[in-house]
Structure formats: structure tokens, C-alpha cells
Amino acid sequence: MPATGTPRSALSRNGLRRGVVAAALPLLIGALASCGYGSDAKKDDAPAKEVAAGGKKLSASEVRIGYFPNLTHATALVGLQEGLIAKELGATTIKPQSFNAGPSEIEALNGGSLDIGFIGPSPSINAYVKSKGNNLRIISGSASGGVKLVVNPDKIKTLDDLKGKKIATPQKGNTQDVAFLNWISEKGWTVDPESGKGDVSVVRTDNKVTPDAFKQGSIDGAWVPEPTASKLVSDGGTVLLDETSLWPDKKFVITNIIVSQKFLKEHPDVVEAVLKGTVKTNEWINANPDKAKASANAKLAAEGGKPLDAKVIDPAWTSILVTDDPLATTLKTESDWAVKAKLIEQPDLTGIYDLTLLNKVLKAAGKPEVSDADLGAK
């Protein structure tokens, strides 16, 4: 596994004291591993109303931004809720859309109904490879971490006890699914990646359904992102493993920011303004952790009809890092794991990143530039 060697910033107070990550939490695959609360492509025009009166309009009158109503999309939740992204766009309005799964967000991007999206690394990889590098670019990181293995303590007390048990992942080939399959392989156990059958039964279950399946006993545990992981803990589960412990620097990409290549080419000024907003949002999150947590929860409540309980959001919030760095080396590792699991063919990821505008924004803000791990356009 790679070591990025970059500074870490956490949503917790202790992490804050170490500063915002400006250089450094990825679906894999098919769909974003994140847990969804809310409906697919749910539009929310409220942030658009926060555009400064008389603000200068950029080259596009509007920008359509997609995200998941998940805590691993904290940058989007807080940036939209607090108007921090809208402020940088002036008179260019935001048209937000929330999604529950990576494929639907990628479909919107490919179909021209979405310009920029917050999404996991695996949907990004899949879409990039399937389009032969013609539909998107990763332009920034957003989050790291926030993934845990939670189990029924009455059935599973040690990692070795997972053998023969039923463990849920969000979707076949998504980031958590691939990470779990790789972990199983490193244990010397075997599982068929298509059916999920083997020494461990990998049960692909929508994150919205996983808590009920756990309470009913139809699964013995789950390798899932936040806030699903903390929801399972609140229902009696025990965290047996935090995925951050498996990475040398305890950082791995869980959320990227992607853009339509067409939109990037035609409206680089708008893309740059959005990135100014996300960088400032990450700064604000780290400077105001409690306010940021409340802001994210307010946005989740607006999406799903009710906020997360404190016993769920508090532990979930502190396990996620916001970062401007896309942690490109970890995306490459996750891609290698998917190949190893025979879920994808060896991809050519050259050109998947374009960090030009992000590094411009970071440099102007006096922050370190970030690396594309030699996966930028040549």
C-alpha cells in the first residue's frame, strides 16, 4: 500500500490542531460505496438563492453539482448548506442534485444533466475506463476514511471469526466491497467475487437496508462507510476494524470531485470558482468542527426528513478527514485491488486526474500543491 507522506486534517478537534489537509476517503466501482439518505437526483435550489446580489456572472449561468447525502460528502453538504461554494460563484447559480449511488451520478454526468460531482474513486475509475478516458476528470479530493467493519459481538469476537459468517458490503465492486475482498484474500481465504460465496459470505446490501438486516440477524456484520457504520454500532454492533488502520498513512480516498470534460473545457472559470469554494469549505470545517457537524446534519435532515442522532453522527464525524488532496496513490491501489479480485481488467488510468486548477487555487491560498501520482494528462 502506498504512503502519501502528506499532512492530515481531521474533522475532530485534535485533527484540526494539525491543520487542514491541502495535500494529502475513495466505490469501488460500479457504485459509490457511500450510504445514501434521500432520493436519487433530488434537486435542491436553496443554495442558489444565496448568490450575492450583483455578483459577477462567470462563463456559465449555472453549474449543476451532484453529491450523496452522506457524511463522507461533508465538503458538499457543508459547502452548500453554508453558501461557501455559492459565494465563490457570484451570479452563477448552483443547481444541486443528490444521488444514492455512483452509477446514477455517472449516468447524469454522461447524459449532460450534471457538470460536477462528489463521488467515490471506483465509479470514477469505471466510468473513465469505459469511456476510454473521454467523459470525466478527477479535479480534487474531498474526504478520506470513514469506513469500518462492524459486527455482531455475540457471533464475532475476533477477525478470524469472520470465516463462515455473512458480511454485508454496499454493492458488488464498490470501494468497500473491493477493500473487503482484498482483506479476505490477504487472510488466505477465498470468495467468488461475482456471487460473494466462499469462506466468507459477502452479501451486497444497500446501505439503507443494512441496519434492518443487521437487527434482524440476516447478516452478521458489515464493511460500510459512515454514517451506516455508526448506525450499526448504535444498534448493538462493535467496530472490529477501522479501514484506516490498513493504510500506511492512515489515509485513503473515499470521495473525489469529478467534472465533465466538456464542462471543464468550456467553463474552466466556473470549475475554478467551485474549487475555491470547496477549499474554503474544508478550511471552515476544520476551524469550526461543531458548527460544521451541525451544518452537515441540517443538510442531511433537509434531504432525508430528519437529522442523525448524536450517538450516530458524533462518532461518524470524527472518523472522517476532509482533504483537498485526491490521495491519488491510494486510488491506484484500490484499482489494483479490483483487478486482483477479477472485478475489472487492468485499466489505463493515465489522464484520469487534472489538478491544474486545484493547484492554482491552493497556491493562491498559500497551501502546498498536490500530486496526481503520474496519473495526469500527458
Image (cartoon, grey):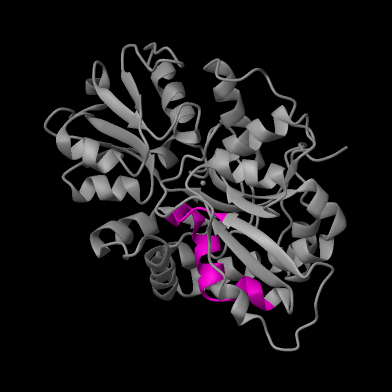
Left or right: 32 in relation to 324: left
Q: Residue at x 44, y 29 (%)?
A: 177
Task: Establish if 246 lies above or below 24.
Answer: above
Which image quadrant for residue 373? top right
Residue 75 covered by magenta stretch: yes
| Residue at (51% x, 40% y) in the render | 32
Determine whether, in the image, residue 175 is placed left or right of residue 96.
Answer: left
Q: Who is closer to the viewer here, 72 or 326?
A: 72
Residue 96 vs residue 378: left or right?
Answer: left
Give the overall secondary structure of the magenta segment.
Answer: helix
Q: Residue at x 63, y 65 (%)?
A: 95
| Quadrant of res 156 | top left
Image quadrant in which the N terminus is located:
top right
- The residue closer to the viewer here, 371 or 285, is 285
| Nearer-the-camera pick, 211 or 232 | 211
Disc tally is 0
Residue 26 visible in the displayed image: no
In magenta stretch: residue 232: no
Residue 80 picture location, percent across and down: 55, 69
What residue sits 38% from the left and 17% below the top?
196
Residue located farthest toward the left when viewing the structure as drawn:
154
Horizontal relation, residue 60 to residue 168: left or right: right
Residue 189 x/y as whole percent: 36, 12
Q: Residue 28 in the image: x percent, y percent?
A: 53, 33
Q: Is residue 193 visible?
A: yes
* Residue numbers of the magenta segment: 67-87
User: Measured along the vertical axis of the image, is residue 128 above or below residue 82?
Assistant: above
